[in-house]
Amino acid sequence: MPRGQLILIEGLDRSGKSTQAAYLNSKLPSSELIKFPDRSTPIGKIINEYLTDKSFKLCDQSAHLLFSANRWELNQQIRELLNQGKFVVLDRYIYSGIAYTLAKHDFQGQEGDEIVSSGGPRSKELGDVDWLLGPDKGLPKPDLTLFLTLDLEEISKRKGWGDERYEMQQFQAKVKECFLKILTAEQDPTIQIVDVGGKDINQVSELLWEIITSKGHDKLIDEPIHLI
């Protein structure tokens, strides 16, 4: 029986990914939008406190595993939706978890360091992609990942910038570097790096929709759900 496709929008904070995820959700036939972290779940409520209260202390290993656990909370729901023939649009997912933890591991002696990385000393596993990916193995793998990239100066001027723990320009630069390290389009054809710098919302929406339709990601497919 044909299934829906899992489409992921990744990007830095305030890169416009949530706006574009909502747009794709409205364009795709019979689709559902899921945002990570999902702050409504039991684990998601802890994550929300961690992200919004800069005095909340949590060691980096625990934070990483909490974000993964939050994805597992929605694992069954995502699988059921896809098997029901629905498209699922994800606003952030596994790659965000890895990129942000890698960035915290590499981010040293800069502005806000005690806020970005707290609750314990850095350990080598925080810089080990295999270790970081381990808790997510077995989760559904996106059929298409769209990473929205643009200049940091442009992002920092957007409304709401700086409201949450990780919204500092130097740290976001490190996050961008880590995203591009793990999202290797040359090795994984399901990954697409999309430069949205200097484009307005409608131009980005048109560009993403063109990518999706040209690659057939707006159609049901006769393939099993791929796993991480």
Image (spheres, helix red, strand yellow):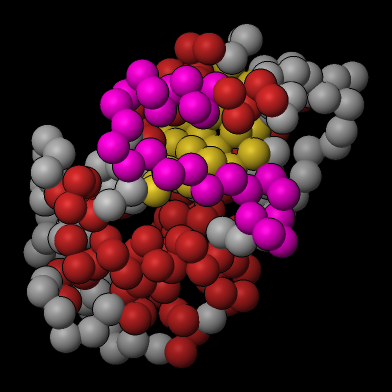
Name the image quarter holding the N terminus.
top right
Asked if residue 189 is among those painted magenta in the image, a careful observer would answer yes
- The number of discs equals 0
Above or below — where is 52 with respect to 109?
Answer: above
* Percent x, y of residue 25: 50, 18
Name the image quarter holding the C terminus.
bottom right
* Percent x, y of residue 191: 62, 48
Above or below — where is 198 with respect to 103?
Answer: above
* Percent x, y of residue 53: 13, 54
Query: Splitting the image into 4 quarters, where does residue 183 fall?
Result: bottom right
| Left or right: residue 186 compared with residue 57 | right
| Left or right: residue 222 compared with residue 117 | right
| Residue 32 shows in this picture | no
* Percent x, y of residue 203: 38, 23
| Residue 7 shows in this picture | yes
Query: Splitting the image into 4 quarters, where does residue 2 fall?
Result: top right
Identify which residue, 90 or 157, lies in the foreground: 157
- The residue positioned 29% from the left and 26% from the top of the image is 200
Q: Which residues are magenta?
A: 185-209
Above or below — where is 151 with respect to 78?
Answer: below
| Left or right: residue 124 compared with residue 107 | right
| Left or right: residue 208 compared with residue 169 | right
